[in-house]
């Protein structure tokens, strides 16, 4: 954890453009990975929400 | 744990807890929750610019998870979002420029006037949403009684009850047949003019730009009352819009060095689970209940803003907003548990 924290601080001190790409890429990537993974697990567990019709 | 970018030491459990509460509220109401994370981080001694940027980055991750689930529930109107996003960006840009122009012109007390406008807008919106929800709840109750008299069985899941809005401006705006017209099966109205969606999004964007806020609390009511989205669809659609606007916002903030990625990641640990709980809870509540809770949260946000801006008590304001987020998260989890028990019970 401390190693990761120091690495992030190093990136922050380095190229800001790279830091910006890493920031957005990381949060989007984690969100997508976790979202689809949990959706897949949900399907396997039978928690499969069908699309409901709105009126 | 020490965070070198923000140069503060914060307990990890606190950040995870804040992330969780914001995630639950965000997944439930379709907002980023910047109005909760910014004061919560600022109260810990994190500089305001880093609090805003870090909150934005965390918001993107949680919104992606919540959008995936809402999309599976059929709650995301990508067509409306595709029109809304450019309208909002244009509006925010116009609002920010008006603000800069006012400040450059040396207008005295601009910040005070904006703060007063913010409080008036928030409180008016909160009161309106609560009153409208109460009225709609009464109408729904009457309809349920009639259904019971006819011997019809009410729907098993509360979210399957058609959304009821007592004051529906969208139906009136539907008569504005300015081409191109947009039809979407998810909307309550048959079709709506592209320009109505675009202009409404631009207007909320201008307000957000003027006030210097993300504007999720403005967009969800706009989608419900002006565009004709059922509340659940407004929540899902706004979450999708947040991914785009939040990514852009966190990129520009990161370029300026205003994002502490480590703090954002630690908060995401809680937010990823919270966003799923919040999204799932929308399956077990009616649109009117969702709006009533939203109105109550806006009232707490107004009180917090008054403490911060007018009574000069920022710590109390932060405690109030964090307490509200924790309370609302508990209520939402309670609604989810109640809904699951009801839907699985044999009776």
Image (cartoon, grey):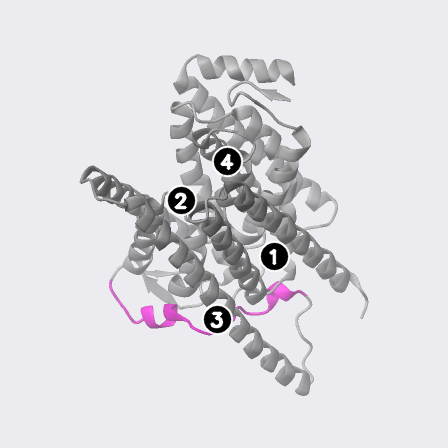
Residue named by callout 2: B213
Q: Nearer the viewer, mark 1 or mark 2?
A: 2
Residue named by callout 1: B282
Same-chain status of marks 2 and 4: yes
The residue nearer to you, when weighing B9 against B56, is B9
Give the distance between the C-alpha atoms of the residues marked 3 and 2, in whole angstroms: 27 Å
Crowd around label 3: few <14 · some 14–19 · many ≥20 (10 Å): many
The quadrant of the image that shows the C terminus of chain B is bottom right
Residue named by callout 3: B165
Could you say whether the residue bearing mark 3 is in a helix, strand or loop?
loop
Give the residue displayed 64% in from the left and 22% down from the top.
B1
Crowd around label 4: few <14 · some 14–19 · many ≥20 (10 Å): many
Residue B10 drawn above or below residue B59: above
Q: Earlier in the sequence, mark 3 or mark 1?
A: 3
Q: Which residues make up the magenta segment?
A: B157-178
Magenta residues, dominant SS class: loop
Could you say whether the residue bearing mark 4 is in a helix, strand or loop?
helix
Return the residue found at the far front.
B311
Q: Earlier in the sequence, mark 4 or mark 1?
A: 4
Residue named by callout 4: B55
The reply to whether discs 2 and 4 touch (Cβ–Cβ < 8 Å) is no
Give the distance between the C-alpha atoms of the residues marked 4 and 1, in whole angstroms: 23 Å
Chain letter for mark 2, please.
B
Q: Earlier in the sequence, mark 3 or mark 4?
A: 4
Crowd around label 2: few <14 · some 14–19 · many ≥20 (10 Å): some
């Amino acid at each position: 954890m401390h190693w990761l924290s120091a690495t992030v601080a190093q990136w922050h001190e380095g190229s800001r453009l790279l830091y910006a790409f890493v920031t957005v890429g990381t949060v989007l990537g984690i969100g997508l990975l976790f979202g689809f993974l949990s959706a897949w697990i949900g399907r396997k567990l039978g928690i499969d929400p069908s699309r409901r019709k709105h009126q | 744990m020490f965070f070198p970018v923000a140069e503060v030491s914060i307990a990890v459990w606190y950040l995870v807890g804040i992330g969780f509460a914001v995630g639950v509220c965000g997944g439930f109401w379709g907002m980023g929750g910047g109005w909760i994370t910014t004061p919560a981080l600022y109260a810990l001694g994190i500089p305001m610019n880093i609090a805003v940027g870090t909150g934005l980055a965390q918001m993107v991750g949680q919104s992606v998870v919540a959008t995936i689930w809402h999309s599976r529930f059929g709650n995301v109107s990508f067509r409306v979002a595709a029109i809304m996003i450019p309208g909002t960006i244009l509006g925010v840009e116009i609002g920010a420029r008006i603000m800069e122009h006012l400040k450059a012109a040396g207008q005295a007390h601009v910040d005070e006037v904006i703060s007063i406008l913010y409080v008036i807008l928030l409180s008016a919106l909160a009161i309106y949403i609560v009153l409208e929800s109460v009225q709609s709840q009464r109408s729904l109750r009457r309809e349920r009684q009639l259904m019971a008299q006819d011997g019809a069985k009410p729907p098993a899941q509360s979210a399957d009850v058609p959304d009821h809005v007592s004051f529906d401006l969208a139906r009136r705006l539907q008569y504005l047949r300015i081409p191109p017209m947009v039809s979407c099966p998810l909307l309550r109205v048959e079709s709506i003019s592209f320009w109505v969606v675009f202009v409404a999004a631009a207007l909320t964007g201008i307000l957000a730009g003027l006030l210097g806020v993300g504007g999720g609390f403005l967009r969800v009511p706009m989608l419900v009352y002006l565009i004709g989205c059922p509340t659940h669809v407004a929540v899902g659609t706004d979450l999708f819009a947040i991914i785009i606007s939040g990514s852009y916002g966190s990129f520009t903030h990161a370029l300026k060095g205003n994002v502490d990625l480590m703090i954002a990641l630690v908060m995401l640990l809680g937010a990823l689970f919270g966003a799923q709980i919040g999204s799932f809870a929308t399956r077990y509540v009616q649109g009117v209940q969702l709006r009533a809770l939203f109105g109550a949260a806006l009232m707490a946000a107004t009180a917090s803003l008054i403490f911060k801006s007018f009574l000069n008590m920022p710590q109390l304001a932060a405690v109030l907003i964090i307490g509200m987020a924790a309370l609302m998260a508990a209520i939402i989890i309670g609604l989810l548990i109640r809904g699951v028990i009801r839907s699985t019970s044999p009776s």
